[in-house]
Image (cartoon, rainbow, N blue to C red):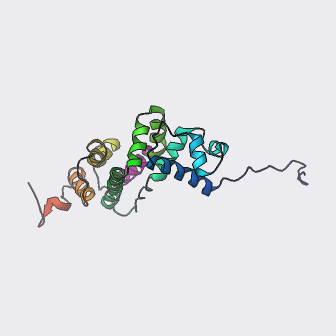
């Protein structure tokens, strides 16, 4: 059948993807890993069989196992907190609190630890994860810091990347490098307030370093 106005063949739409099928495939990967299946033993054929679909159904969505595993890691992650845009301090606390909760989730999930270990041991896969996930998080943090500099709340003589590392570094050190370190409630506030006292545009201390209207010296 042709379009009467143009005489052209109408475009044919492909079969729409089923979110339920994609979720079933991802859940099948998680189920197999929770049962003790190793990453190396995990195959597209086995995942498809567990999900009750054909291998072609999986390959239509992901070109191979690594791409599927990357999607599983994304599915395991809690969406990052979006800055409210009212208080730079509160936005920084919210972002670091998200990192803290993510660290706790990783410690409590053997599957997530296994998946992240696989990502970091495969450079190309880690690069994809970095470009699609980590860079977005970093830019969110940098956006808050740029707003703070523009509003005069933060010093403008520091490189934004360095400024971001001053805030995120302590939390990332505890969640990634030193996993035996505690991640107590209030840690995000403690880090943000401590760093703010060194990088604020004004000399007035904030948070726990301010007592009775005077700073600790």
Apparent side of residue 126 relative to residue 190 in the rendered image (left or right):
right
> Can see residue 201?
no
Residue name at image x 65 percent, y 55 percent? 18
How many numbered marks does the figure carry?
0
Residue name at image x 10 percent, y 57 percent? 216
Residue 157 lies in quadrant: top left
- Magenta segment: does it hold 31? no
Residue 36 placed where, x, y %? 43, 45
Residue 196 placed where, x, y %? 24, 54
Between 44 and 174, the one lying in front of the other is 44
Apparent side of residue 211 relative to residue 55 in the rendered image (left or right):
left
Magenta span of residues: 134-155
Residue 28 placed where, x, y %? 54, 50
Q: Residue furthest front?
A: 35
Between 46 and 3, the one lying in front of the other is 46
Apparent side of residue 200 relative to residue 40 in the rendered image (left or right):
left
Between 154 and 61, the one lying in front of the other is 61
Residue name at image x 58 percent, y 41 percent? 44
Q: Residue furthest left?
A: 217
> Can see residue 100?
yes
Q: Residue furthest top?
A: 123
Residue 204 placed where, x, y %? 18, 58
- Magenta span: helix, strand or loop, mainly? helix
- Magenta segment: does it hold 149? yes
**Quadrant where the C terminus is found in the figure:** bottom left
């Amino acid at each position: 059948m042709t379009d009467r106005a143009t005489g052209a063949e109408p475009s044919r739409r492909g079969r729409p993807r089923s979110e339920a099928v994609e979720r079933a495939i991802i859940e099948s990967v998680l189920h197999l890993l929770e049962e003790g299946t190793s990453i190396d033993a995990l195959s597209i054929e086995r995942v498809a069989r567990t999900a009750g679909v054909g291998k072609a159904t999986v390959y239509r969505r992901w070109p191979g196992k690594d791409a599927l595993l990357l999607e599983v890691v994304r599915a395991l992650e809690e969406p990052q907190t979006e800055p409210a845009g009212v208080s730079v301090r509160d936005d920084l606390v919210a972002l670091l609190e998200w990192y803290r909760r993510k660290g706790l989730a990783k410690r409590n999930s053997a599957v997530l630890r296994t998946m992240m270990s696989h990502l970091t041991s495969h450079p190309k896969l880690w690069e994809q994860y970095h470009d699609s996930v980590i860079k977005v998080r970093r830019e969110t943090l940098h956006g808050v810091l740029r707003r703070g500099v523009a509003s005069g709340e933060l010093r403008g003589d520091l490189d934004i990347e360095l400024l971001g590392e001053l805030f995120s570094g302590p939390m990332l050190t505890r969640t990634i490098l030193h996993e035996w370190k505690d991640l107590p409630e209030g840690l995000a506030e403690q880090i943000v307030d401590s760093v703010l006292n060194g990088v604020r545009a004004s000399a007035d201390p904030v948070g726990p370093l301010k007592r009775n209207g005077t700073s600790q010296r």
